[in-house]
Image: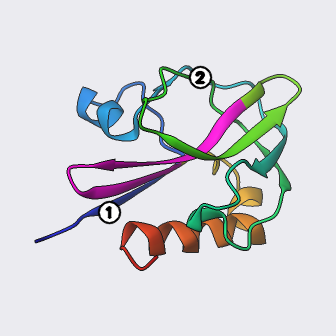
């Protein structure tokens, strides 16, 4: 039995084949200009949020619609121009694990220690180590 994992970071849906939208489980309707975005945990029991605290980054956050019914949101973010949006969620499809993290337009995000914890947790979860 082979179990596959997929981690999508800063994954935009428009312009991708329909299959990609089916995998990440939403429609991404653009984003406001870069601004300060407050990111916070919504599911403290998720293995993806272990050791992760709230943080703020300067980024562009997607306006999400049509989130799949099986998506388990574990992070959200808020900004003045964009409101509250899901920022990270998981799905399980055909025995595989998918993690979607929408931040990452700027180096500020990738250098943030809390975001790096999310990346490590996401890799561990998609590879069935947690």
Tell which of 113 and 47 is nearer to you. 47
Q: Position of residue 84 (x, y in %)?
A: 76, 29
Instruction: State whether the magenta stretch is mostly helix, strand or loop.
Output: strand
The quarter of the image holding the N terminus is bottom left
Q: Residue at the spot x=37%, y=74% of the render?
A: 128
Q: Earlier in the sequence, mark 1 or mark 2?
A: 1
- Image quadrant where residue 64 sits: top right
Residue 66 placement, left or right of 109: left
Region in magenta: 85-100
Q: Position of residue 96 (x, y in %)?
A: 27, 57
Residue lying at the far front of the rendered structure: 45
Judge whether residue 90 is colored magenta. yes
Q: Residues within 10 Å of mark 2 (few under 14, many from 20)?
A: some
Q: Residues within 10 Å of mark 1 (few under 14, many from 20)?
A: some
Choose mark 1 or mark 2, whichever is in front: 1
- Image quadrant where residue 14 sits: top left
Q: Which mark is residue 30?
A: 2
Q: Position of residue 60 (x, y in %)?
A: 71, 36
Mark 1, secondary structure of its residue: strand
Judge whether residue 65 is colored magenta. no
Mark 2, secondary structure of its residue: loop
Q: CA distance from mark 1 to mark 2?
A: 26 Å
82 up-or-down from 37: above or below = above
Q: Which residue is mark 1?
A: 5
Q: Residue at the spot x=67%, y=52% of the render?
A: 43
């Amino acid at each position: 039995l082979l179990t596959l994992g997929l981690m999508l970071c800063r994954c935009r849906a428009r312009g991708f084949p329909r299959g990609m939208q089916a995998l990440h489980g939403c429609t991404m309707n653009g984003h406001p200009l870069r601004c300060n975005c407050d990111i916070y945990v919504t599911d403290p029991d998720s293995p993806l949020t272990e050791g992760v605290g709230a943080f703020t980054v300067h980024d562009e956050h997607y306006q999400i619609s049509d989130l799949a019914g099986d998506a388990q949101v574990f992070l959200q973010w808020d900004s003045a121009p964009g409101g509250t949006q899901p920022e990270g969620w998981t799905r399980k499809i055909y025995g595989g694990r998918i993690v979607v993290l929408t931040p990452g337009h700027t180096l500020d995000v990738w250098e943030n220690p809390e975001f790096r914890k999310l990346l490590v947790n996401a890799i561990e979860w998609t590879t069935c180590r947690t």
